[in-house]
Structures are given as structure tokens and as C-alpha cells.
Image: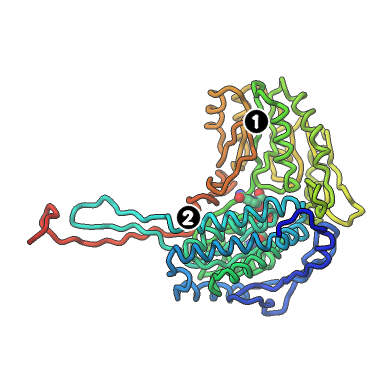
Amino acid sequence: MNDIAIDWHARAALQGHDGRAFIGGRRVAARDGGTFDCTSPLNGRVLTQVARCQAADVDLAVQAARAAFEDGRWARQSPAARKRVLQRFAEGILGAGDELALTETLDMGKPIRHSLGVDVPATARCIAWYAEAVDKVYGEIAPTGPDAVALITREPVGVVAAIVPWNYPMIMSAWKLGPALAAGNSVVLKPSEKSPLSALRLAELAMEAGLPEGVFNVVPGHGTEAGEALALHMDVDALGFTGSTRVGRRMLEYAGRSNLKRVFNELGGKSAFVVFPDSDDLPRAARTVAASVFFNQGESCNAPTRVLVHESVAAEFTAEVVRQAPSFQPGDPLDTATEMGAIVDRSQLETVLSYVQAGEDEGARLLAGGHAARVDSGGCFVEPTVFDGVENHMRIAREEIFGPVLGVIRFNTERDAIAIANDSPYGLQASVWTSHIDRAHRVARALRAGTVHVNQYDEDDITVPFGGVKQSGNGRDKSLHAFDKYTDLKTTWFRIEGDAAGNPTG
Ligand code: NAD
């Protein structure tokens, strides 16, 4: 179990994949029999056929979720009972870790060392953490007058739709599933058509752990088909969306056109990494930014792709970033030494390369990378890419590339740095590097982002909220705050008879 030393190529040749949907506790084909190819970005080969769910399939899944919610088979179990099931689910994820990790790598291209070392444990930890949390969350009693008691309790919202992207397929699913299921909701999950397989397997593992049928359904398919039908569905109470800002806009429209379901958007980013000359460890800053941007092939919403460096240290800092780049040269994702894997598919590879071209056309200086790599493999790989001389109005500074491309923007004053960092439609994360405590606080306060890192970028934990401001979205995944999305506050009033001062009457 979870053994990095496995011969992953041999294992990949043996492992089968089931692409059928998961509705009402069973694997099912799409009602019209439709499928789509699930293609591996490692070599362009088809892994399996996946059910291409349409509105009719989504409707069945929502009906199954609604029936399960209304009869209370999950929602009315005690929190301690739900905890036990979800703990077993988390253990099941770890137990199937090798299989899940391999599926994730074959389906979306990330290195096996990360699927196994990051994605599987983070998914299990998320589910286990919400399992542990749910029987420790108390309601409130309001400080009303003596003749009344007002209880404020948290109720599950009902049927939760989760629509997630392809960059961390299992982790993004778990960030929705953990709090939504722990709170007693039923869930219909729509994974990305680019990475549908691991979510389907998660549903089976949840059932094996004892989750009642109908509580967790998975409808693979295209965004404009299954995704749209789910977001428009009149019987979905809440929609947790993670994906692009472009599609996040549509989620709000869908809610407006249907039943005003509550929408929580976790969207794109163009995070700023601000390096001041008084930073006492420039080499560490350079290593950190390279590792953060090139991790997961640059396909991370919070990647700090706008690197703002003070003019006086820009040459030294940029040279160090360029020195780091070759250690992220893409390799075979099934080789356990590989640190950077394949871009999710050919169209995303072409998008990344078109941004490299746009950067050059707009006058930025390409210092490293910029080309497709491992072309003979038939897969989708791109070199770690570094631009200098980037200006904040250029497309590579304004638009999310979602590939291993970073751009250095030079600044002269602290005021300039803050203005440039905040001059973005996005506000997901930011980082400030300085040894000056006042500056660290000043700049951290001034940066408009959901999370600001000081002298680091890699800290992350299920205990802290994750989400953005501005067009990076409005929701918060992770931490106890995620329960706010999947629960309603309910007030129950009781009148207490007594005299005017609330004293006993007899
Ligand atoms: P995407 O917006 O293209 O797709 C996300 C999901 O929405 C997929 O399941 C897709 O099938 C579905 N979808 C697409 N069009 C739809 C439509 N018209 N109606 C309904 N559903 C639709 O995003 P992506 O390319 O899969 O993922 C990358 C994006 O996700 C990036 O912008 C990244 O920053 C963002 N992201 C954000 C976070 C965060 O927490 N803020 C985390 C990970 C990824």
C-alpha cells in the first residue's frame, strides 16, 4: 500500500478503469448510452470510455440525492455515526492509495510521487478532519429576554452540487465532500471531463465505508451538458464551484435563471510574490517561487506567477530562479524521481505555448524554457518557463496561464509594489519577502488577497480557510468556515411563561 517503489509502468498496464457514472449507489451508463474518450496526457492514449451524462442523468442523480436527504438515512444519523462512516471512508482512500494515485497520474498527468505523496494523503486527511470536526460543532443560544429561549442550530442545506476542475481532481472533490457530507447533506459531484476517473472511485469507496446509497452521486460529463444541467437544476440547494472565473460567472447566471440556489465560487488567480531588497534570504525566495510556480506543472490556482522584485536585486534574484528551472524539467510522470509531469491535455498545452508567444510579442524577455518537451512521448509536456521584463499590463501578467510560466516585474518603491500587486482582477493569494517586521505587516495588510504569506509560500493546512477576493471568488474551502456553505442557520423560539421578570409563577 502507498509504496513509491512499485513498478508503476507494469501496474499501469494492469490497472483497469470504470468510467460509468455513480448514481443511487450503483455504477450506471448514461441513459442515452453516450460516452467520451478519457485520454491520458502521458502519451495521448485512450484510458477508457466515460459516461457522457446529460440532463436526464443529472436529474436521476439529483432525485437520488433528494430522496436520500428527505428520508434522513444520512442527515438524521447522529454526528458521531456520520463521523465513523467518514473516518472509514478516509481509511479506505489511504488503503486504495496506490490505485487512486496511479489513476490521478494517468488521467491528468501529475507525477506519481505527488499523486501518492500529496493528493492521496491530503484527500484522506480532508475527509477525516471533517469527520472529526462534525461532532464537536455546537449550536448557540441567543441572549434574549427572560421570557424566551432562542436556539440557533445548523441544519444541512439538502442537496449540494459540486462542480470541480481537473488540476487536483481528488483534493478539490474532498474540499466539497468533507464539509458537505459531514454536515448531513447529499451530494452530486460533477468532475472535470479532463479528469473524471478518481471521483468515480471515491464514490465507490464511500459506499464501501457505509455511506448510504444516494448520498453521494457522481455524474461525469461535459461542462455545457452535465455541468449546466446540474447548475440549473431546480432541486439543488447549494452549488460549490471550483474552476475558472469565466465559468464561475455562468454559475451565478444559472442560479439566477433557476431557483436562486446559493453559489460559492472558488476561481482563478494571478498571485503576486513581492520581493524587497531587505529580504535576508534571496536564494530561498527564488527557490520558493520556482517550486511554487512549477509544482503541478503550473496548474495551481494559487501559483505566484507575478513575481515582483525590487530593481536593486532583480538581476541576482532572476538569475537564481533561472538556475532553479532545469530541476523542474518535465519527465516521465510514472518515474518516481520526476518533479514535473504532463500538462492535462493538448488544448491546455497549446494555450500555455500561445501565452509564451504573447509574452514575446509584447516585449517580455524569455530567459528559460518556452517550448514543448518530451514530444516523442506523444504526451503533453512543456518546459519550466521564466520571463523577465514583464509589465503588469501584458497579457502574461493579467491572464491566468495555468502552466509553468512565471514573469518577473520590477519595481522601485513599496508603494509601487503594492499598487502593481493589487492591480489585477484576481485576489487569491500573495507573498511578501522582507526582514523588516513593520514592512511585513504593512504590506500584508495592503495586499488584497484571501491569503498572504510572509517569507514563505508553501504553508497550507486543512485547518485554514482557502479562497479569494475580487474575481477569485467568494467562497472559502477548508477549515470550520466551510460548514457555513453547506449549512443553514435555523432559529427556534420557545416562550417561557413566568412573571414579567421571568420568575417562577407558583
Ligand atoms: P473550468 O472553469 O473550465 O471548469 C471547471 C468545471 O466546470 C469542470 O467540471 C467543467 O466541466 C465545468 N464547466 C465548464 N463549463 C461549464 C458550464 N458552461 N456550465 C457548467 N459547468 C461547466 O476550469 P478548469 O479548466 O477545469 O480548471 C482550472 C481553473 O480552476 C483555473 O481557473 C483555476 O484557477 C481554478 N481553480 C481554482 C481553485 C480555487 O480554490 N480558487 C482551485 C483549483 C482550480
User: At 66% across and 76% down in the image, what residue appears?
Assistant: 27
From the top left corner, tell me how far across and down residue 470 is, in percent: 56, 44
Residue 416 picture quarter: top right
What residue is pinned by disc 2?
133
Q: Amino acid at mark 1?
A: Val
For label 2, the SS is helix
User: At 44% across and 69% down in the image, what residue appears?
Assistant: 77
From the top left corner, tell me how far across and down residue 430 is, in percent: 61, 37
Task: Pick whichever, 183 or 397, lies toward us.
Answer: 183
- Ligand 1, what quadrant? bottom right
Q: Is residue 324 above or below residue 135?
A: above
Residue 183 horizontal side relative to residue 323, left or right: left
* Closer mark to the observer between disc 1 and disc 2: 2
User: Marks 1/2: CA distance?
Assistant: 36 Å
Residue placed farthest to the right in the image?
Answer: 376
Residue 311 picture quarter: top right
User: At 50% across and 74% down in the image, what residue appears?
Assistant: 68
What residue is pinned by disc 1?
274
User: At 42% across and 55% down in the image, what residue appears?
Assistant: 137
Task: Pick whichever, 396 or 483, lies toward us.
Answer: 483
Task: Pick whichever, 121 or 20, lies toward us.
Answer: 121
Q: Is residue 47 above or below residue 442?
A: below
Q: Is residue 305 above or below residue 202?
A: above
From the top left corner, tell me how far across and down residue 136 is, in percent: 42, 55
Q: Amino acid at mark 2?
A: Ala
Residue 55 picture quarter: bottom right
Which corner quadrant holds the N terminus?
Answer: bottom right
For label 1, the SS is strand
Q: Is residue 505 visible?
A: yes
Residue placed farthest to the bottom in the image?
Answer: 32
Q: Residues within 10 Å of mark 1 (few under 14, many from 20)?
A: many
